[in-house]
């Protein structure tokens, strides 16, 4: 996966403040960031007791034939 841009890093700082008041904000932002960066692939979420505990990303690279 590509490195986050400086815009994403800045939004991460904003997210750190927000996640202190809303513990669900950080995991949801990670999912949103994964969707933004991916073109083809699978995002698999693992939930235990109603809480997101793991995010697996399988990215596909497609080449012109």
Image: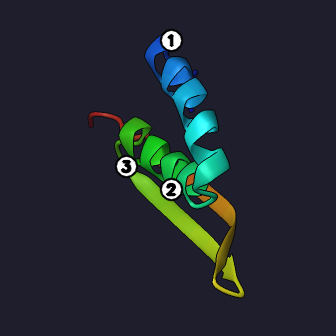
Q: Between 65 and 37, which is closer to the camera in this rendering?
A: 37
Occupied quadrant, residue 54? bottom right
Secondary structure of the residue carrying numbered label 2: helix
In the rendered image of this protein, does residue 9 appear above or below residue 60? above
In the rendered image of this protein, does residue 4 appear above or below residue 47? above
**Residue 22 got which mark?**
none
User: Which tag is nearer the camera, tag 1 or tag 3?
Assistant: 1
* Residue placed furthest toward the bottom: 49
In the rendered image of this protein, does residue 6 appear above or below residue 62? above
In the rendered image of this protein, does residue 2 appear above or below residue 21? above
Residue 59, visible in the rendered structure: no
Reading the image, the residue beneath label 3 is 40
Side (left or right) of 25 relative to 47 = left
Q: Between 19 and 57, which is closer to the camera in this rendering?
A: 19
User: Which tag is nearer the camera, tag 2 or tag 3?
Assistant: 2
Judge the density around disc 2: few (<14), some (14-19), many (≥20) Cα neighbours within 10 Å: few
Disc 2 and disc 3 in contact, CB within 8 angstroms: no
Reading the image, the residue beneath label 2 is 28
Occupied quadrant, residue 57? bottom right
> Residue at image x 42%, y 36%?
37
**Residue 6 got which mark?**
1
Q: Earlier in the sequence, mark 2 or mark 1?
A: 1
């Amino acid at each position: 996966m590509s490195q986050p841009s400086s815009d994403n890093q800045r939004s991460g700082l904003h997210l750190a403040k927000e996640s202190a008041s809303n513990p669900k904000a950080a995991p949801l932002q990670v999912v949103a960031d994964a969707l933004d960066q991916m073109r083809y692939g699978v995002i698999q979420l693992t939930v235990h007791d109603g809480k997101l505990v793991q995010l697996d990303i399988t990215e596909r690279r497609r080449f012109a034939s």
